[in-house]
Amino acid sequence: MRGVRVSAILLTLALLSGASTLQAQEAAPGSRRAQLEGRVLRGFLDRTQADMAMTDAQRARIEEIMRGSAERHRELARSAAQLRRELRVAVENETTSEAEFTQLLERMAHLRAQEQNAWQADQRAIAAVLTPRQRAIFSLRWIEFQERMRAVMSQRRGRGGPPQ
């Protein structure tokens, strides 16, 4: 269950960063991607701020945390994409040794641990800003947001959009 939750959060962070897939791209300042990221994040916080009775200072700090999280996720997503490519090549190559598979799987476990640590750090940072009631409301809104984003991504794939 914990892995599913972490995966869902990481997916949402990718969506918040404006990624149409989990393959990360560089976001140059002023780029369309950076603008989309800002709009999505502001929209989520606009809808959530009033429900949570969040102050402007709290909102600014949460936005900062979420932007930092998205930046970290882009790096992890790049690493994950590279590792998936390497794993695919290894699986397709019948001469790949068991030791090479072991190394790839260890790297995958290490990457998942990094993702989990990043998620926990984000949760601690958010907890330091919000009251327990605000955190509960934020969590509910975040889950609802994730569900909407998954539905949008599912529809995109159904229309021939890029697979995840």
Image (spheres, rainbow, N blue to C red):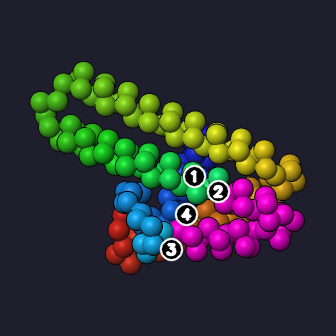
Callout 1: few (<14), some (14-19), or many (20+) C-alpha neighbours within 10 Å?
A: few
Q: Amino acid at mark 1?
A: Gly
Give the residue number, with chain letter if any, for mark 3.
35
Q: Which of the labelled discs sits on residue 68, or is there none? A: 1
Say what secondary structure mark 4 lies in. helix
Query: For the residues marked 4 and 3, what is the alpha-carbon distance in whole angstroms?
Result: 11 Å
Query: For the residues marked 1 and 4, what is the alpha-carbon distance in whole angstroms?
Result: 11 Å
Q: Amino acid at mark 2?
A: Glu
Q: What span is in magenta?
A: 36-63
Residue 151 visible (yes or no): no
Residue 38: % across, % down: 57, 70
* Residue 50 placement, left or right of 142: right
Q: Earlier in the sequence, mark 4 or mark 2?
A: 4
Q: Residue at x 44, y 31 (%)?
A: 110
Query: Is 147 within the magenta?
Result: no
Q: Are the residues flagged by discs 1 and 4 in contact, CB closer than 8 Å?
A: no
Q: Earlier in the sequence, mark 4 or mark 3?
A: 4
Callout 2: few (<14), some (14-19), or many (20+) C-alpha neighbours within 10 Å?
A: few
Give the residue number, with chain letter if any, for mark 4.
16
Q: Are the residues flagged by discs 2 and 1 in contact, CB closer than 8 Å?
A: yes
